[in-house]
Amino acid sequence: MRIPLKVENIAGGPKPILYATLRIPQFHIYRPIRFVIDTGSPQSAICEKDALIMQIPFNRIRKSIRVYGIGGSSVEAKPIKRAVITFRNEEGGLEHRTLPVIYACRTTKRDMKTRSLSQSLPSILGVDFLIDNRFKLVFDPVNLKAYLEEV
């Protein structure tokens, strides 16, 4: 089975993109979302902009980790368990995959420059998503083609 991806210019170059719907049952959230498939990221994450749009209640998630983002800015990452991502396969059918954990992120700095930069970053599906779902990424940036394929 293949999952077709879009190829779009983000952060200075072509990136493979998955348009999907994310459902977070414990918060009654069901929203469309655009993910960059990022093989350089070990974990999947909801960016600050998407977290704000989804109105993720950060104060209701007790655990958090600190990660350091672009320019060394501190980012608070809150684990969300058992979110469900839905997307279309090559035949047009819906695929539903449960994410054991995805991190909702927000910057801890309050200055406008850092907040603006943090809110410009995309949500990502990392290597954890590829491994958990046994997907390989095929990415041809020259011809602007990409897809995920089950292995």
Image: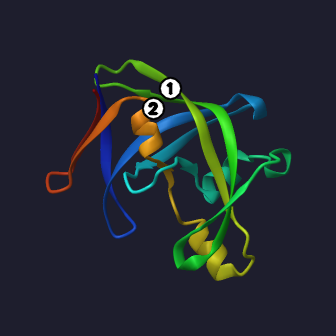
Q: Reading the chain from its start, which is encountered first: label 1 or label 2?
A: 1
Callout 1 amino acid: Arg
> Is residue 135 placed above or below 50 in the rendered structure?
above
Q: Residue at x 40, y 41 (%)?
A: 18
120 left or right of 89 in image: right
Percent position (x, y) of residue 45? Answer: 56, 50
Question: Image quadrant for the N terminus?
Answer: top left
Find the distance from the CA under tag 1 to the CA under tag 2.
9 Å
Q: Residue at x 65, y 56 (%)?
A: 105
25 left or right of 133 in image: right
> Is residue 92 placed above or below 80 in the rendered structure?
above
User: Which mark is on residue 130?
Assistant: none
> Is residue 91 placed above or below 114 in the rendered structure?
above
- Label 2 neighbour load within 10 Å: few <14, some 14-19, many 20+: few
List the residue tagged with mark 2. Answer: 132
Outermost residue on the left side: it is: 143
User: Which mark is on residue 97?
Assistant: 1
Q: Residue at x 32, y 45 (%)?
A: 6
Marks 1/2 in contact by CB < 8 Å: the verdict is yes
Question: Image quadrant for the C terminus?
Answer: top left
Residue 87, image quadrant: top left
> Which of the two residues, 138 or 146, is positioned nearer the viewer here?
138
Percent position (x, y) of residue 103? Answer: 63, 48
Percent position (x, y) of residue 141? Answer: 20, 55
Residue 76, image quadrant: bottom right
